[in-house]
Image (tube, rainbow, N blue to C red):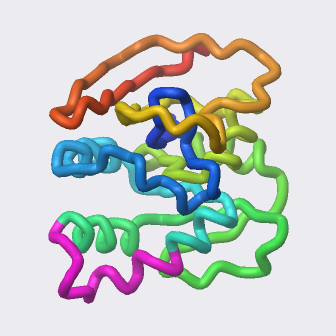
Amino acid sequence: MRKLVLFLHSSLDGFVEGPNGDMDIGWVSYDSDLEKHAKEVLSTADTVIWGRGTYQMMHGYWPSVRSDASASQHEREHAEWIEKTAKIVFSTTLDDVEWNNSRLVKENIEEEIKNLKQQPGQDMVILGSPRFAHYLMQLDLIDEYKITVSPVLIGSGLPLFQGLNQKINLQLIENKTFDSGALGLFYRAIK
């Protein structure tokens, strides 16, 4: 059975976005260590799960990176990976999605995720989309939490965990310390 994996960056005080919204992530301690870590995390996934806002942001950025001479090798490789990877966008307001290998789901979210888990393939990763991740957490549909914690306190913004109405037990599978002082935490939901 495929797993649904949440992969997000968090500040030490538990925020995934700063006070200025979804583009306010300049505090993430992103360096070559985290690039390597991200590549490892994504190597087990063949499907990206996004909500509307993250899809629109990613679609507005990554397709042009593949041919951008100023982009780093890591950025170009990531852009190539995203281009080839299946992308499933959950939105009740979009009418269509135009990016290569993208599919729109407008209703029956819980049923769709459960059906996707039963299909053959690698893991599915929620890459960003913290608001959509909150919703999936409330439904207890996330199997693994892969969180990188940056050594910074930002004081306010969008919390990593929000709106949970039940306890979710987690088992620590792995932790890493990066040269920047960031931590890589890998938890599995105990079901």
Residue 157 belongs to the span the image colors magenta: no
Q: Position of residue 104 (x, y in %)?
A: 69, 69
Q: Residue at x 23, y 68 (%)?
A: 77
> Is residue 2 visible to the viewer in this orientation of the structure?
no
- Residue 185 locus on image (x, y percent): 37, 25
Stretch in magenta: 59-73
Residue that appears at 56% across and 71% down: 57
Question: In the picture shown, does residue 112 fall above or below 189?
Answer: below
State whether residue 38 appears in this view. Answer: yes
At horizontal 63% and vertical 39% (from top left) the residue drawn is: 156
Q: Nearer the viewer, residue 36 or 123?
A: 36
Left or right of 67? Residue 64 is right
In which quadrant is the C terminus drawn? top right
The location of residue 164, given as percent across then percent down, is: 76, 25
Residue sitting at x 34%, y 49%:
42
Whether the magenta-drawn stretch holds residue 65 is answered as: yes
Q: In the displayed structure, does residue 73 sit left or right of residue 79? A: left
Give above or below for 38 relative to 81.
Answer: above
Numbered disc total:
0
What is the quadrant of residue 69 in the picture? bottom left
Q: Position of residue 75 (x, y in %)?
A: 26, 68
In the image, taking residue 117 as reference, residue 109 lies left or right, namely right
